[in-house]
Image (cartoon, grey):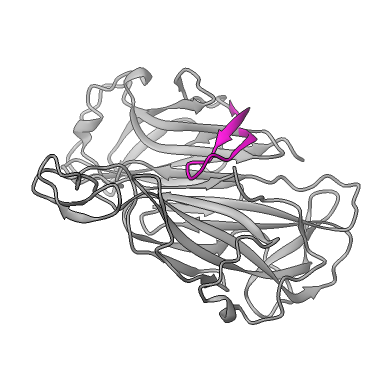
């Protein structure tokens, strides 16, 4: 289970003392294309109804192109919600850019309305692109879904199982005939384009913000924090970034996977954290409470049994040594060139990617049962 709130992401981890299957999925933003900033709120893209965009005409080449969400995992559906300020005096319940005062405070009664046009596509294992959707999906209201009926990733099937070859053909794998992939695609991506409508309220010069959270059925989530502008402003723009925490282990996994992992160099990877931004650096930290004050992590059962564990963070972009997570740990971004997983595009970004890992530095012998724990992740940007 992943639950996203503004400013922090709540990651729920379940521990089961019996064996269960494992899955993982990931959702990221390809910042080598598109943009999260600079949208002009003093103009509209369309006077048409949102439903008129549910057709085969692509719109990624229009000024509202946000960029590409990249998905790896089993078939799923993406839910698009508003996790930023809620526009006031807006009757259509769509998405909105809302005004940001020079002191950083939101003024949600000044806004520009928009909706999202989405198009899912696949990258086959031979690096050819496939527009399997053939039609756009419109996310008009927060909570609207985009179905992704195919899986993606490099997982392979066993001999005798049905799989896919590099061109997306399906067949039974015999060990040498090429039908070795579990899914027909290496990556699936979603072109995300916002369409500003004619609806607006009390616009004034300055910066505007919108925050959209995208969540998979399996629980991976990603935050798209956007900014818009109207005319010229001497104020600093709101921080713009893409941030996600993806669980890489099932909600339930056997205690035996933790046994013997007594140091942070032996830790079990349970999740992955990704931050990137064109404009602002950041630090990320972890805690066991919503106030961000405690690094004492515990698993708890329904009948009140507990046992402690510890966390570590293994940064891969930039590549750093794995470190234990303490109450004072802060992990900083670095400026790096990031390459698109879809094509040869690249971009210079503030980035931090790494694995969240779990280990048992204490001697524990928990009673049989199901145990739960929560890990809070906090992002502090260089702005405000």
Q: Residue at x 89, y 60 (%)?
A: 205
Q: Is residue 284 visible?
A: no
In this view, 47 is above or below 135: below
Quarter location, residue 48: bottom right
Q: Nearer the viewer, residue 111 or 8?
A: 111
Q: Is residue 203 visible?
A: yes
Quarter location, residue 364: top left
In this view, 317 is above or below 198: above
**Looking at the image, how many numbered discs can be counted on the residues?**
0
How far across and how far down the image is residue 188, in percent? Answer: 42, 53
Q: Residue at x 33, y 21 (%)?
A: 361
How far across and how far down the image is residue 75, in percent? Answer: 32, 59
**Left or right: 144, with 73 as reference point:** right
Q: Nearer the viewer, residue 47 or 96?
A: 47
Image: magenta residue range:
331-350
Q: Residue at x 43, y 32 (%)?
A: 355
**Left or right: 227, with 254 as reference point:** right
Location of the C terminus by quadrant is top right
């Amino acid at each position: 289970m992943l639950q996203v709130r503004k400013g922090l992401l709540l990651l729920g981890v379940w521990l089961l003392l019996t064996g269960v299957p494992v899955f993982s999925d990931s959702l990221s933003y390809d910042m080598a294309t598109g943009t999260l900033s600079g949208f002009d709120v003093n103009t509209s893209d369309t006077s048409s109804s949102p439903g008129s965009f549910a057709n085969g005409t692509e719109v990624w080449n229009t000024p509202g192109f946000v960029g590409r969400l990249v998905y790896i995992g089993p078939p799923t559906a993406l839910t698009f919600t508003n996790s930023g300020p809620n526009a006031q005096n807006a009757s259509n319940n769509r998405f909105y850019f809302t005004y940001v005062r020079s002191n950083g405070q939101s003024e949600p009664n000044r806004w520009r309305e928009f909706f999202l046009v989405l198009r899912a596509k696949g990258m086959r294992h031979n690096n050819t692109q496939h527009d399997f959707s053939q039609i756009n999906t419109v996310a008009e209201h927060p909570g609207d879904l985009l179905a992704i009926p195919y899986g993606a990733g490099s997982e392979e099937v066993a001999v005798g199982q049905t799989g896919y070859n590099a061109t997306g053909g399906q067949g039974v794998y015999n060990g040498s005939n090429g039908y070795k992939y579990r899914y027909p695609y290496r990556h699936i991506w979603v072109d995300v384009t916002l369409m500003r409508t004619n609806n607006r309220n009390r616009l004034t010069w300055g910066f505007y913000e919108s925050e959209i959270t995208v969540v998979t059925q399996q629980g991976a989530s990603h935050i798209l924090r956007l900014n818009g502008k109207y005319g010229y402003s001497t104020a600093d723009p709101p921080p713009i970034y893409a941030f996600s925490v993806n669980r890489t282990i099932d909600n339930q996994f056997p205690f035996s996977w933790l046994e013997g992992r007594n140091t942070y160099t032996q830790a079990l990877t349970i999740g992955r954290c990704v931050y990137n931004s064109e404009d602002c650096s950041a630090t990320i930290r972890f805690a066991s409470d919503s106030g961000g004050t405690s690094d004492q992590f515990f698993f708890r059962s329904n009948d009140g049994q507990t046992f402690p564990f510890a966390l570590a963070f293994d940064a891969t972009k930039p590549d750093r040594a794995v470190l234990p997570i303490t109450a004072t740990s802060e992990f900083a971004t670095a400026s790096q060139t990031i390459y698109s997983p879809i094509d040869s595009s690249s971009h210079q970004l503030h980035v931090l990617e790494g694995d969240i890992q779990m280990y048992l530095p204490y001697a524990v012998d928990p009673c049989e049962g199901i145990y739960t724990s929560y890990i809070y992740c906090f992002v502090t940007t260089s702005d405000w």
